[in-house]
Image (cartoon, rainbow, N blue to C red):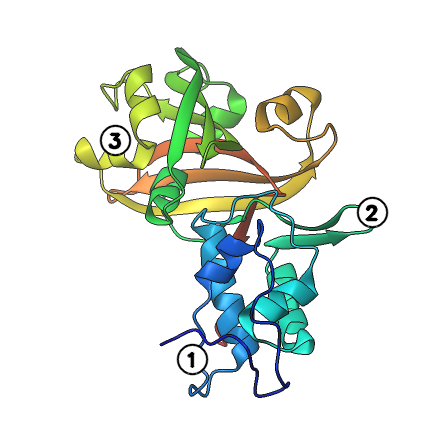
Amino acid sequence: MTRKYGHDTERGPTMATAPRDELSAFVDAVVLDRSSPVPLYFQAAQALEEAITSGKVPPGTRLDNELLLAEQLGLSRPTMRRAMQYLVDKGLIVRRRGVGTRVVQPKVRRSLELSSLYDDLQTGDQAPTTVVLSFATQPANAGVAAALAIDDGTPVLCVERLRSARGRPIAKMTNYVPDGLLDSTAEQFEATGLYRMFRSAGIQLHSAVQTIGARTATASEARLLDEPKGSALLTMTRTAYDDRGIAVEYGTHVYAASRYNFEFSLLTP
């Protein structure tokens, strides 16, 4: 496929010598195949989406000059506007009065499957990193004991972590694991994910019960997640079971809703 400047089938001649500024990374990302049955707006939109999600075009890049983008790509303004609206609908750019159009941090989309956040971020090329906030064995309170089907006061390992994607904090996670199930250290929890540690220990996860909700962030959560106080959080609680049906983990997590969402498929019965 080749990029062609200077004309659009929907529009006559365009400026082939338009100046290039911080939009150049966007322009360089777009390769248009005008012989393809795929609409030009969708070709442009998908190329721009890949440039944003891969980090080639970083958050904060201004895209105010839609006309200039159209000129540089050899597209009509309505075609370019439709491509930009696609990016708005995907949550990749925002338009605000007085601020203009800017690229925003792409949201992490996580499918509702029995997988760990670490694995999902790594699979999605999101460069996950972890900071352990606390790591201690403690007596299980009533809620944790009920989730893990153990007696109140039974020792459990409690690990609190801050998980980031591409250097931005995305989730605060608290996990409870029956004491002695894992021979682990805080350093291991910073280097990898819990479910990878389970697999390394020969623990085979089979199923989970999960609840998803939403609420506003507390002051401490907002500071950790680099969000305004009172911003929206997604919440998730999960009890995971091994292939014998024994509860091996109970987790309570909060996610920055501005940078994260869950997605799932629905099938007709």
Spatial distance from mark 3 to mark 1, Cα to Cα? 46 Å
Sequence-wise first label, 3 or 2: 2
Q: Relative to residue 77, is residue 229 depicted above or below?
A: above
Tag shown at residue 243: none
Q: Relative to residue 129, is residue 220 depicted above or below?
A: above
Q: Quadrant of residue 82?
A: bottom right
Residue type pointed to by label 3: Met
Whether residues under marks 3 and 1 lie with C-beta atoms below 8 angstroms apart, the answer is no
* Quarter of the image with the N terminus in it: bottom left
| Residue behind mark 2 | 98
Which residue is most to the front?
A: 17
| Residue behind mark 1 | 33
3 or 1: mark nearer the eye: 1
Sequence-wise first label, 3 or 1: 1
Q: Residue 156, image x and y in percent?
A: 38, 18
| Residue behind mark 3 | 197
Identified at 70% across, 21% down, the residue is 219
